[in-house]
Structures are given as C-alpha cells and as structure tokens.
Image (cartoon, grey):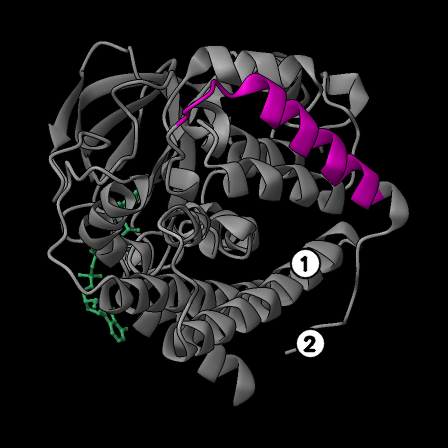
Amino acid sequence: MIFSPTALSPAEDALRHEVHRWLAATLPAGFRPGLGLGGRHDPEFSRDLAKQGWVGMAIPREYGGAGASTVERFVVVEELLAAGAPIAAHWIAERQTAPALLRFGTEAQRRWFLPRIAAGECFFSLGMSEPDAGSDLASVRTTATRTESGWRVDGTKVWTTNAHLNHFFVVLCRTSAAQDRHGGLSQLIVDLSSPGVSVSPIPLLDGELHVNEVVLDGVHVPDERVLGEVGQGWAQVTAELAHERSGPDRYLSVLGLLRAFLAERAEAGHALDDHAAGAFGRLAAQLWSIRRLSLSVARALEQGEAPATEAALVKDVGTVFEQEVVETLRELAAREIDPEGASLFERLLAECVLNGPSWTLRGGTTEVLRGIAAKALSR
Ligand SMILES: Cc1cc2nc3c(=O)[nH]c(=O)nc-3n(C[C@H](O)[C@H](O)[C@H](O)COP(=O)(O)OP(=O)(O)OC[C@H]3O[C@@H](n4cnc5c(N)ncnc54)[C@H](O)[C@@H]3O)c2cc1C
C-alpha cells in the first residue's frame, strides 16, 4: 500500500479560494449546511455550479467537461462538501458515472451522456445492492436476459439513493450463469422512467426519504445502453471503487457540525476548557491526516493508477473518524439533544446522531474494507 505525500500546487490552492468565494456569494444567508454528500438534491444549484465549469470538471473538453485534473476536481469537491452545499443531484453522475463512461463507455454513450452530466442536467443513481447482496455483491440476482432488440431486466435493487429524483441508474446484473461467481455480471444503464420500473422510498432513522427499493419487472434496455463489455461487470465495478471510496465525502460529513459547535461556544462567550480543547485538537489532527491520505489517492488517480486498496483504507479511517466526531461532540455538548433545538449545532448534532450509523455502511462496510486492506497487505 503506497500513500505518496503530496500538497496542493499554488494554482490548485487559488482554485480552492475561488470556489470558496463563489459559495459564500451563492449560498443564501442562514443556509443550513448538509452533512457532506448528504447535502440536499437541488437541480438548480447543480446547473449553476455547472455554469462555473465545476460539475464533471474532469470530463475532457471534447465531451463538454472542463478537462481538469483529478486533484482540481478534488479541490472543488472538498470546498463544496466543507460548505455542506446541496450537491446530491449531480453527485453520483459526476463522481462515478462519468469516469465509468470515459473508461468503459462507447463513443456514442460518451457523446450523449457526458455533456449532459457536465451541464448538471443528467443525474444518476447506483444500482448495485440488493436485498440479499450488499457486501457480497457477486451474489446479485437481478437478471438481464437477451431479447431481439436488447435485454429484459428483472429483479430488485435496494438502498438506491435518490432513485426517486434521478434520471438513470447503472444496474449491476447477471447476464449469464458462470462457474466463477464474479463472471457473468454486466452493467446496464437503465432509464428510471422506463415502463416496469417501480421506485418505493425507504425512510431512514430521521424519517427522511433519500434511499429506495427499485423493482425492475421486465424492463427493456436497448443494446446501446450496455455499459462496457457484457460479462465484465465485476471488473468494471471494482475499478470504479477507488473513485467511490477515497474522496473528501468520506471524512467531511461532520465539518459543518464541528464549525457549529465552535460558533455556539463563541456566541455564548464560553472558551473551550482544557478537556474540550484537547478533544477538539485530537479531532483536528485526525482530520488533517485523513485529508492528506485522501489527497494522495486523488494524486495517484490523476497519474493513472488504480489505488483501490488505499481508497478502501481512506474510507475506513474517514468514516470511523466521522462517527468519532459525533460521539465526542455529543459528550462535550453534555445535554439532551433536540432535533428542533434552538441552535444550529444542536439540530446538526441530532441529524448526525441519526445518520452517522450509515456512514460506515454505504460504499462498503468497515469490516469489508478492512478485509480488503488485510488481503492486500498479505500479498
Ligand atoms: C444511506 C445508505 C445509502 C446507500 N446507497 C446505496 C446506493 O445508492 N446504491 C447501492 O447500490 N447501495 C447503496 N447502499 C448500500 C450499501 O452499499 C450496503 O448497505 C453495504 O454494502 C452493506 O451491505 P448490506 O446492507 O447488505 O449488509 P451486509 O452485507 O448484509 O452486512 C451485514 C454485516 O455483516 C458484515 N459483513 C458482511 N460481509 C462480511 C465479511 N466478508 N467479513 C466481515 N464482515 C462482514 C458487514 O460489515 C455488516 O456489519 C446504501 C446504504 C446506505 C446505508
């Protein structure tokens, strides 16, 4: 496992300041920050951001993007997440689908989807997990059967974030029975408005409706919507994971909470006591270290490497850190938490307590990520 040290160049740092200023001018006064990638789904914000060239910015210019580097994208994304901006609409399309299309898509798919993604007009969800296939993704049972004009898809996907709001989802499905359980899987791009697709919300602990069960009942998918090669779905999904797991979304869900805690203390005229200052200092040091690891993975991706194991480790330490922040601030708050509380800190803390458990699940659980890291170390 290799984490090469790296830092932002002056140009990358200037970009960071530019995004910071734009967000300060664009987000409304009294804006309530979202919890990192749990920020609101706001197509208008996504389109405005796209006009700045900051959606799908790593997409090459010939496909409507800004042709920016992975680290430039990292810089923009980090600022957006730090502000708790409403990024959910374009999030998956730009983080995951666009790189997958660039790597595995046909020229026609790239020409059709990528300019729309970069314009903040085409939103994607991820259709990997199923009721009996989460960590063990190779056991997916959704099938795609050959028809004369394409594929017929049947099965059930679960935990599909924002399927009720997005346009498409990339479905991992079985296209043939294979001896090797990782073989015979393929990825299809499914239009969420197709006949035969039913989307039902699954309320989370806080009652919010972000995730869904999606039933596919005889859904027709034309041949031109196969992503990559039939039978190569496992290799393709695995290749995407470095993009999914290593980014600032895995350690910045709590930044708004940390800021709100300090702001509340400052407003009340209370300096941090030694215990609180010590706890806060430890969290800040961890945050900075994890950020360096995440930046190092972004730099490796920029150089064409596929640091899947390093990415798994960043997600593990990042999401465990996020949960530790919630527990530490809960202890420092030393009061009953009220989701309708008067202070922003209290409301955000309540939201974090209810949502925090999912942070180590979505995108791969802690146990599974540690298994990946352990296997890589023993090679
Ligand atoms: C808020 C949220 C949003 C999500 N969004 C999406 C989405 O948009 N699209 C999508 O496809 N999925 C999504 N997911 C699903 C997520 O990827 C799965 O929940 C995750 O992969 C775990 O799968 P599972 O829930 O089936 O748990 P299981 O795989 O059943 O795991 C249950 C427990 O067993 C442990 N375990 C399992 N296997 C092993 C092993 N080999 N070694 C040690 N321990 C193990 C796990 O760590 C866990 O503690 C989302 C989940 C959440 C919570």
Left or right: 342 as drawn, with respect to 74:
left
User: Ligand 1 appears in which quadrant?
Assistant: bottom left
Give the residue displayed 76% in from the left and 50% down from the top.
302
Count residues near mark 2 (Cα–Cα under 10 Å), then give few for <14, some for 14-19, many for 20+.
few
Q: Residue 2 carries which label?
A: 2
Q: x and y percent of residue 379 in the render?
A: 56, 87
Percent of width and height locating residue 104: 61, 37
Q: Earlier in the sequence, mark 2 or mark 1?
A: 2
Residue under pointer 1: 295
Q: Residues within 10 Å of mark 1 (few under 14, many from 20)?
A: many
Residue 15 against residue 2 in the figure, above or below: above
Ligand 1 within 8 A of label 2's CB? no
Q: Identify the residue shown where x is 80% and y is 18%.
A: 62
171 inside magenta stretch:
no
Residue 57 visible in the picture: no
Does residue 22 show up magenta in the picture? yes
Mark nearest the camera among 2 and 1 is 1
The CB of the residue at mark 1 lies under 8 Å from ligand 1: no
**Residue at the spot x=63%, y=78% of the render?**
1
Disc 2, SS:
loop
User: Compared to 92, does 351 lie above or below?
Assistant: below
Q: Can residue 121 be seen?
A: yes
Q: In which quarter of the image is residue 228?
A: top right
Is 173 situated above or below 223? Answer: below
Q: Main SS type for the magenta part?
A: helix
Res 335 label: none
Residue range in magenta is 12-31
> Residue flagged by tag 2: what amino acid is it?
Ile
User: x, y percentage for residue 75?
Assistant: 69, 43
Residue at the spot 39% in from the left edge and 13% down from the top edge:
149
Horizontal side of residue 113 vs 366, given as left or right: right
- Left or right? Give the position of 213 relative to 231: left
